[in-house]
Image (tube, rainbow, N blue to C red):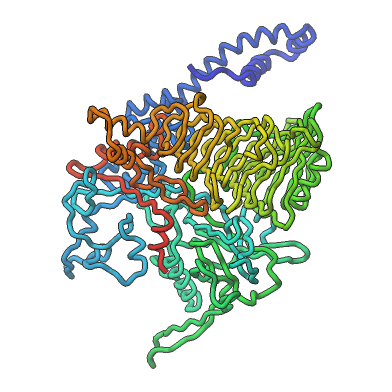
Amino acid sequence: MSKPLSPARLARETQRLLSLLPDHIRALDEASGHSLEALFSVLALGTTEIEAEIDALYAGHFAETASPGALDDIAALIGAVALRPLPEDAGLNTRAYVANTMRYRRGKGTARVLEALAADVGGFGAVAVEYFMRLSRTAHLADVRPERPATALLVPGETAARTATGFDVLPRLVDLRSIVRAGGRHHVPHVGVHVVRPLGPTYAAPEGTAGLSEVEMAGVPLAAPWSPGGIVQAGYYQLAAVPGAVLRLFNPDRRSQDGADRVSEADLASRLKRLPLHRELEERRAAALESRDAALADVPWFDGEGQPFAVFLGRTVAGKLVYDRVPDEQVCIANLETPPSPAGARPAPQRAHSWFTGSAAGPVPHNANSPVTCAFDPVTGRMIFADPLPGTPVQAVRVAYAYGIGRAIAAGPFDRNEPDVPFQIVTAADVTTHVWLVGPRDLPLAPGVSSAASLAAAVALWNGVAAAGHRGFIVLTDCGRAGGNAALEISLPGGAELTIVSSRFEDQQARPGVDPDPALLGYLVRAGRSFVVEVPLAVSAQAAGAVGGRLVLDGLSLTGGLTLRAGAVSDLLIRYCTLRAPGGAALSTTAPLRGSSLRINRSIVGAVRLDFGPAPATGSLAIADSVVSADGAAGLALDAYKLETDLRNVTVLGAGRCKELEATNVMFAAPFTVTRTQAGCVRYSWVPDGSTMPRAFRCQPQLAAGAAAAAKGAALSPPEQEAAALSVTPQLLDTSLDEPTVAMLAANCPEAIRMGGESEAEIGAFSAVAVGLRYANMRRLFEDYIPFGNEAGLIDDTRSSAVALRRNRP
């Protein structure tokens, strides 16, 4: 059966049937109380149901529109292998796989199909390598194959960076071990599918290169001053939100949507390396000076449209701030892991270039200078501008870029719209609604919507009007920053609700024949925006002894932490935020909580300290799909020993404690203490030794120890218990919140962790990604799509930052 009929569709069908009657009959029916219309509504019910069933039948003919049941029928019809289901919020389904199965079968046995399968089934960027192409061979002029070097090329600086990846071209001796069972690689029947797991959320560059307005640049993040050692240096900027931190830039995902082409290194969402970018920009500079076209084989990275990154300079022209994009040829790639010496050094505004041309008289030397605007480091997200920059002084610097993360959590440009957050902002008769927009705007404001010059100004306006029953929205429409020396103080009276959200704000659209809704103020589109709050944020109730209202923080990156004063909130929701205060408490209280409900969803959070003093406190803490870390602070990562705590799909990088605990798919990286163990339960989690927990269900390493004891038929000795625990110990790529692979499972992580969560998902913050299930689905398909006698193995090329930095030299 199709889905239930909507009242709107039934009403349209009723009116369609009525329109078939003459006008005078419809007029008589209206005058007599619409009895005929009521009859037609009964008739319309049947015709509408029949049409709905016909629509569902037609939709079931196509994989793009079929219902889940019809999609299974299509899969059975074409012989698509059934896959193991992923979690509901994994962001991936089998529709693309089923739709493309016939195309896969036509290309069966080719590396291109394996790459397409990895994209549709696993959602990963992947490179398929036929390892017979990497075997060493005897070079001969009768069989010249430049793509297969006879000996190792050790001179190019990218050799080390590409070693053991899908783009490693070093010739190897044959390895006769099985690629599936023993990890062998270089053998004639072996095919390796190299996958890169991190996502590459992208702040896209706008169209155009000159005279761009602030509105056009609203989706491009604003760079902040980089102050090495706390000393402000002219022309020094950074992209990281935290002062002095690093931001690892990634290449945007540029894979072909139709899967017709093989994947190249410049197509994958992976870490940017300095050397290939440097070589390409040098080639572009030389080609521009020499009045020739750049060699296409040497320029795969910069596309002229803002990828992989683009730098914009904002200057005041005719009283308005406008932005110009720095040409790619004027950017120099540099290593800025450490500040230049001497302090404050800046690159020269020009670089000399020499070349020769031929003539009848012999080589002719040429010399020219190429302009340099800035030195940029894609590995740290830092830049230094040349001195002096030509033209009027620069007021702002923005950079369009992509970065890496294991899942769409924390502040970022991805889509954060969900059914449980308001999309429309509508006024109500019994609620006073205030809306302030912070950011550039080129259209007049609708009635009921105001503008504020800054976040601090918007907070001050809210504090001036906030009262019980009031609702406020501070909409940050620009990827900007809120700095300063003073903390932001939010007053939140009981019964009031304030939402601070980084979002686009769209006005009500005028439609022909549709009267505008006077109660509709606009729409919140939570995509393409994030906002950095560099100052501490504090919340307090409006009256002493009272309990505040509801506060929602959405899409923000807070680097100074959030403090809750006495009775600050009754309900706090932090969603898609990066909440940090490196070396201190990211979320803290200055008085015991009184019945407050604190929720953190899909966020990266520093140390959480919710217990203040010996006085009793009440309330609850719920964290889901998030990473919690001590973030350099001494003491506990999660301190809530007076609160009832609920953790689901969380990685806790540090010790912690709470009063009561309900936990599912949680990775406790350090011992965790629960005061009231007679209540609650811990399920499908990693619980290290030294923890005090309530009853446990299918938790590691206790599950592994129990299995080992059952196999032995006796109790385990201490060394055997330690060995059982070591066999299932989680392996993480990174634990620093500055790194893109923080809390991601390493390739050598045991299957008991990778598939030990609820419904065989992984344990930890990225449970919904279900990497183990995706790998299992991909391996299941290999036997159907590789030639008989060949073997295909999955190889994870995701690197930790420590390994990547060792490879990324210079």
Residue 607 seen in the current view: yes
In the displayed structure, 530 sits above or below 356; it is above
Across and down, in percent, residue 443 comes to 75, 48
In the displayed structure, 440 sits above or below 29; it is below
Q: How many marks?
A: 0
Relative side of 613 to 114, left or right:
right
Relative side of 554 to 691, left or right:
right
In this view, the residue in front, 232 or 130, is 232
Across and down, in percent, residue 95 comes to 42, 33
Which residue is the extreme one toward the right?
464
Across and down, in percent, residue 642 comes to 60, 33
Across and down, in percent, residue 523 comes to 69, 38
Residue drawn at point x = 42 percent, y = 66 percent? 276
Q: Quadrant of the C terminus?
A: bottom left
In the displayed structure, 227 sits above or below 703; it is below
Q: In the rendered image, which quarter is residue 165 located in?
A: bottom left
Q: In the rendered image, which quarter is residue 587 located in?
A: top right
Relative side of 397 to 248, left or right:
right
In this view, the residue in front, 457 or 487, is 487
Q: In the rendered image, which quarter is residue 466 located in?
A: top right
Residue drawn at point x = 58 percent, y = 59 percent? 239
Residue 210 seen in the current view: no
In this view, the residue in front, 810 or 368, is 810
In the displayed structure, 603 sits above or below 217; it is above
Which residue is the extreme one toward the front?
614
Residue drawn at point x = 51 percent, y = 43 percent? 627
